[in-house]
Image (cartoon, rainbow, N blue to C red):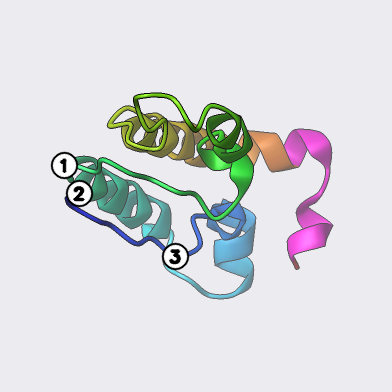
Amino acid sequence: MNRTKIGWAGFNTLTNKYLTTYGLSLDTKDRYLKSLDKLMKRDVEVFIGSHPSHNDTLGKLKRMGGTNNPFVDRNSWPVFLNSLKKRANEIDNIFTKKNVLSLIQ
């Protein structure tokens, strides 16, 4: 069985404002997205997110006990990574609209 461990998957520090404020390279978001593409190539059978909502941990726990283990799910990994890619691409709009840039500074 292949296992992959991923650390914090957050992306709130990828806004252009955050990057320029702290003198970070504006290509950081592009490098983050490329790293997600590399991770997408991994064949992950069991993905457990750092938060229950990342992979429906509680829902899968409720479904335990049948003939199939609900945690063995090759679809959870690409679904999670695609959600990160989508949110990373929208990050500047999300934080601007919600006016929460001050929360990450």
Residue 24 location in percent, x, y? 48, 71
> Residue at 65% of width from left, 34% of height from top?
93
Closer to us: mark 3 or mark 2? 3
Horizontal side, residue 10 vs residue 3: left or right: right
> Residue at 81% of width from left, 37% of height from top?
98
Task: Give the crowd class for mark 2: few <14, some 14-19, many >=20 residues within 10 Å.
Answer: few
Picture layout, residue 50 above or below residue 52: below
Give me the C-alpha separation between circle 1 and circle 3. Answer: 17 Å
Earlier sequence position, callout 3 versus callout 2: 3
Q: Regarding mark 2 in the picture, which secondary structure is present there?
A: helix
Q: Regarding mark 3 in the picture, which secondary structure is present there?
A: loop
Q: Are marks 1 and 3 in contact (CB under 8 Å)?
A: no
In the rendered image, which residue does mark 1 sit on? Answer: 41
Give me the C-alpha separation between circle 2 and circle 1. Answer: 6 Å
> Residue at 36% of width from left, 57% of height from top?
27
Q: Nearer the viewer, residue 67 or 18?
A: 67
> Residue at 33% of width from left, 44% of height from top?
46
Earlier sequence position, callout 1 versus callout 3: 3
Three-letter residue code for mark 3: Gly
Q: Quadrant of residue 22?
A: bottom right
Q: Nearer the viewer, residue 45 or 12?
A: 45
Horizontal side, residue 70 vs residue 31: left or right: right
In the rendered image, which residue does mark 3 sit on? Answer: 7
In the rendered image, which residue does mark 2 sit on? Answer: 38
